[in-house]
Amino acid sequence: MPLQLNEHLRLNPYFVDTSATPGFNWERFQDKIDVISDNLFALLVDEATSEFIKSLTQKYIRLSPQGPDVARLIRDVVIADVFIGDMPQELSRRLGIDQQLAREVANQIVSQLFTPVLEDLKKLHREKFPGRLPAKPATQQVPGDRFQVSGQSGQAQPQKYQGEELPESGGNIIDLRNKP
């Protein structure tokens, strides 16, 4: 069921501070919005994001009155004011919840809300917080081959497929993959 407009605005990361919030700098916020990807912007304004926050705060009943604070934190992560890895600590600090619950809520946000935009988020956070996210390993797939060339060593490594863990020697296994 769609949210009422006032609830959508209250729980939406983009619109959460549309009312006169003391200390909120709209120009600075808009400058940050201008540099994020279209996918990240869509996540901020989408009604599905507000619905996700509402369902999250309903699941964790202690968070019910704190939906706008959850929306602000999601906004701050999406515009890279808060590092994605610091979400559990920020949730604990901002909402006054214990670390275990904060980790659980942060995992829900990342796994359910951020999954479609995770690569965009990682790219933004690598630029804004250098060294905090592991660098993306450079691998190159050779077309038609089962080998990957590693960016570091330049040596071909056989690519493993699920279910391919065969014993090195003996047993009753006959490999017919390359037989005519």
Image (cartoon, rainbow, N blue to C red):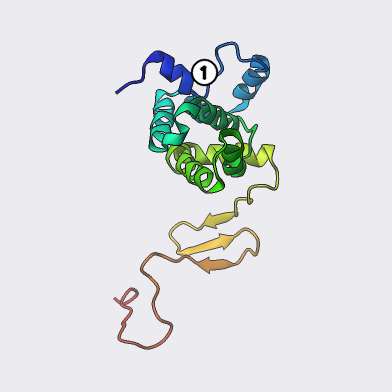
For the N terminus, the image quarter is: top left
x, y percent for residue 109: 47, 39
Residue 36 position (above or below residue 109): above
Quadrant position of residue 161: bottom left
Nearer to me, 180 or 168: 168
Q: Is residue 139 left or right of residue 165?
A: right
Residue receiving disc 1: 15
Residue 106, above or below 52? below
Q: Secondary structure at mark 1?
A: loop
The part of the image, by quadrant, that contains residue 60 is top left
Residue 66 location in percent, x, y? 50, 28
Q: Residue at 45%, 35% (x, y): give it.
A: 62
Q: Is residue 108 above or below residue 141?
A: above
Q: Which residue of the protein is positioned furthest toward the bottom in this rendering?
A: 170
In the rendered image of this protein, does residue 63 appear above or below residue 144?
above
Residue type, numbered disc 1: Phe
Label 1, residues with CA under 10 Å away: few <14, some 14-19, many ≥20:
some
Q: Exactly how many numbered labels are in the figure? A: 1
Apparent side of residue 46 relative to residue 172 in the rendered image (left or right): right
Where residue 104 sits: x, y (%)? 48, 46
Residue 123 in sight from this viewpoint: no
